[in-house]
Amino acid sequence: MKATGIVRRIDDLGRVVIPKEIRRTMRIREGDPLEIFTEKDGEVVFKKYSPVGELSPFAVQYADVLARACNMTVLICDRDHVIAAAGSNRKEFYDRRISSQLDDCMDARQVYVAQAGAVNRLQPVEAVNRYASVCAPIIAAGDITGAVCLVQPESGSIPSEGDVRLAQVAAAFLGKQMEE
């Protein structure tokens, strides 16, 4: 565990403030759920809760089927990381942090579709120089919980209407799974 040198006191209601620097670094926003763990040595650990992460084994299978159907690399992300990747380049994406561009796209609750010759391309993952063909936000109980992204093939071809619908259906299905 990494020490920060920051000490906070618990108030009379049992609350502790997580410093702004840590919230920014860890992308913790107001209203984000946190899991609380305790260790035998007295440590109390806060971890961002990922409802999409709970579906991880299922998401891997879904991504694999989707990748075969659309012949593209498929990413299923929570609000921070890629939790499932399938297709030809899956290893370079798995467990990578999502980009601020994808985060903004999810916040907008809009489906991103790559356009031919577009200058503003969406890079879904930090430190991987590949671009999205389609990104559809996963919404569960009114909250944005992640996204389904189809990665643009090396040829740079634009997505078909069928590819867009597949991503939208996948995102809607995963959202419904989290609600149950």
Image (cartoon, helix red, strand yellow):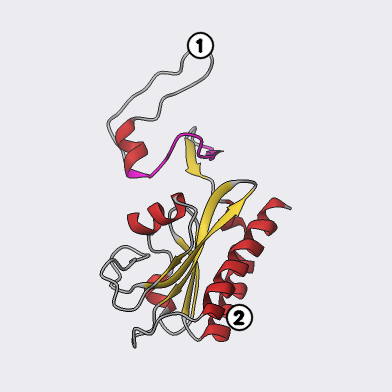
Q: Is residue 117 above or below residue 97?
A: below
Q: Is residue 134 above or below residue 103?
A: below
Q: Quadrant of residue 116?
A: bottom left
Counting from the top left corner in percent of width and height, residue 115 is at 37, 74
Give the residue type at disc 1: Asp
Badge 1 crowding class, 10 Å Cα cut-off, few under 14, some 14 to 19, many 20 or more, is: few
Verify whether residue 27 appears in magenta: yes
The N terminus, quarter of image: top left
Between label 1 and label 2, give the one nearer the viewer: 2
Counting from the top left corner in percent of width and height, residue 101 is at 34, 57
User: Mark 2 falls on what kind of element?
Assistant: helix
Counting from the top left corner in percent of width and height, residue 130 is at 32, 74
Q: Is residue 173 above or below residue 88?
A: above
Mark before the other along the chain sequence, 1 or 2:
1
Q: Which residue is mark 1?
A: 12
Residue range (magenta): 25-40
Q: Which residue is mark 2?
A: 65
